Image (spheres, rainbow, N blue to C red):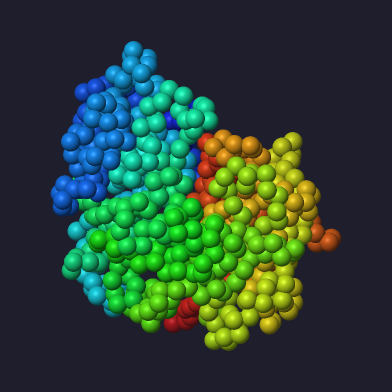
Amino acid sequence: LATGTVTYQSIYHTGKWTGDLKAFTVDPNTGAIAAAPTWSAGTNLSGLTTSTASTRNIHTYNPAGANANKQYVAFSDPTKLSSTEVTALGGSANAQSMINYLRGDPYYEQKNNGTYRNRDTALGDIVNSQPVYEGAPDPNRFNGPTFTGSSTYATFASNELSRSPTVFVAANDGMLHAFDAGTGTETFAYVPGAVITNGLSTLSNPNYGAVASAPHQFFNDGDLTIADAYYSSNWHSVLVGTTGRGPAKAIYAFDVTDPANIQFLWERSSGDGLANSSYIGQMTGKPIVAQTADGTWSVLMGNGYNSTNGSAALLQFDIQTGALTAYTTDASTSNGLAAPAVWLADPTDGLSTTAYAGDLLGRVWSFDLTAANTGHTGTHVFTATDSSGNAQPITAGLLAGKDPTTSNVWVFFGTGAYLNSGDLTNLQTQSWYGLIVQSATNSLVSNLLSGRSSALVQRSIVAEVAANSSATPPTLGARVFTPLPSPNGMAGKFGWYIDLTSPLNGAEGERMVTPNQFQGSLLIGTSRIPVATDVCNPSGRGWIMALDPFTGTNPSDLFFDVNGDGKFDSSDKITYNGKEYPAGGLGFSSIPNNPIFVGNTMLVSFDNGKTSSLNTAGSVGGLNRVSWREIVNQ
């Protein structure tokens, strides 16, 4: 936490279906997020005129173009688009006015005697896409590895120190947006071609998002990844994004090494007719950029949901061309694969050898990414089920980590779905899992298929207290997990699980639909308990929780500042069976998103648009002396 720390928050407004991206400074002394934003991208894109809208730097993709130059075109002239795209924009008679409107020209809106929907800003709603910041690379990132290109990375990073900091985010106006991180001025935008041909023109309907015949759509709603990759004998910073839950079912990539001169790489979609496109679905979670197999760089993604093929598959796209290899699972339909976790067997060679991902039927799959997997198939590792044997859907990405005491490789995830309106009222018990997926003892992995009751040790939420707003200071809701027993109970077990059932309220539909994360020596998980009938207008509450990752037990030392007084003492503990234990989770009256940790300050954004900063104690556990110096009097 230092002077100059900034956090960026994306926003959506229901009804009007507009959005915003805001920059907030963070107090370097207290960690508090400023009450007012430094800038607002939504404000910057409001008040456009015909002339200012025409100057926006917006591009798109024409899949029918004869070459790369004709495929990547400015989104301004319908003659540069394919006939299918022109038809989707209203035909030759209306395409130009539709393009102008989508670029933000208010001339065509009803308030100006036009026929198209009124907007307060040209920036569309930002629902599931998280803003991503691109700054200068870290010169030490590949210090030590010996793979091709690693020796030149420090030079590449040094040459990029003057890179203009940029924030990227995707919005449901159909566009990927790039904003100057200091001012919020839009510098670039991209409309995937597949978005144009999948209903983008309905944004102009005055009843958009208000009637069943013109429902709100997730046109470009996926998460983004920016990573450095080595190809064509040079390092490049690459951005990869997906359209997420939208009907376009598309993924796209750009070279953003120079944010002032962004270069198009490729776009793939379920309807492009190219090899393996039938596996591309509505992809959720962050794409992974990794070096695989023979040293080539790839984009790895779970294929998502509602693909033409209907089965779960891991997708591997060539970083330069978008050529797609599909790693298949089985023939089960009405299925899809969530975002993967990718593992490097030997960090020094930089090669990602294995990917792990979960599917909608509750199954965890392992994928060998080496050349040995000539059939490009996955291996079934585990099935998540509740106590009645019903499958628990896995829709969040997995997190992988190695136990430093045993060298076992684990994956961590929670179960549950938050994809459609039926999920909102589903009260099936969901669970939090930690599984050993690589071990010198092979049976630790193979026996996972025997099921959780015999393969895993059960941990529980053993105590919970409600929030107390009348206390001085007010306290958040808090819970405690199974304390670490002695012995720890892991002998002969291949992991652990925790049913997300409240000791106070029972089964509430609590679920995990975002990936776990590490903070110091702890595993952090975020859950949500929806209370709504409309997935586009959610309400509810949720928890941010912390565990020992390799035993599934409560933190041994204080981590959360439950009452926010800046101290870590007995007031941050909960009594269970006559003993006090550190809180293992904080409850919130609104649905929290995954937190960001800046130093020991936890920054949280909520689904209702509010933000919060809370103190944590950093890493927990015992301290060990790593060196000492003897001072001898002369």
Q: Residue at x 54, y 37 (%)?
A: 536
Say left or right for 3 vs 254.
right
Residue toward you, 149 or 363:
363
Query: In the rendered image, which quarter is residue 553 located in?
Result: bottom right
Task: Give the vertical position of 198 relative to 91 (above or below).
Answer: below
Pick the front one: 628 or 198: 198
Q: Residue at x 33, y 16 (%)?
A: 114
Residue 152 horizontal/vertical position (percent)? 21, 70
Image position, residue 574 (x, y; %): 75, 55
Farthest right residue? Answer: 578
- Evaluate whether residue 413 shows in this view: yes
Nearer to us in this view, 20 or 208: 208
Q: Is residue 601 above or below residue 178?
A: below
Say whether residue 98 is left or right of residue 40.
left
**The quadrant where residue 623 appears:** bottom right
Q: Position of residue 297 (x, y in %)?
A: 30, 68
Q: Is residue 19 left or right of residue 504?
A: left
**At which x and y percent is residue 329?**
49, 69
Please count the marks in the image.
0
Q: Please give the name of the residue rendered at 77% of the width and 56% of the height, measured from the top-left corner.
A: 463
Q: Quadrant of the C terminus?
A: bottom left
Residue furthest bottom in the image: 441
At 54% from the left and 64% from the top, the residue drawn is 332
Residue 588 seen in this snapshot: no
Is the residue 131 above or below the residue 395 in the image? above
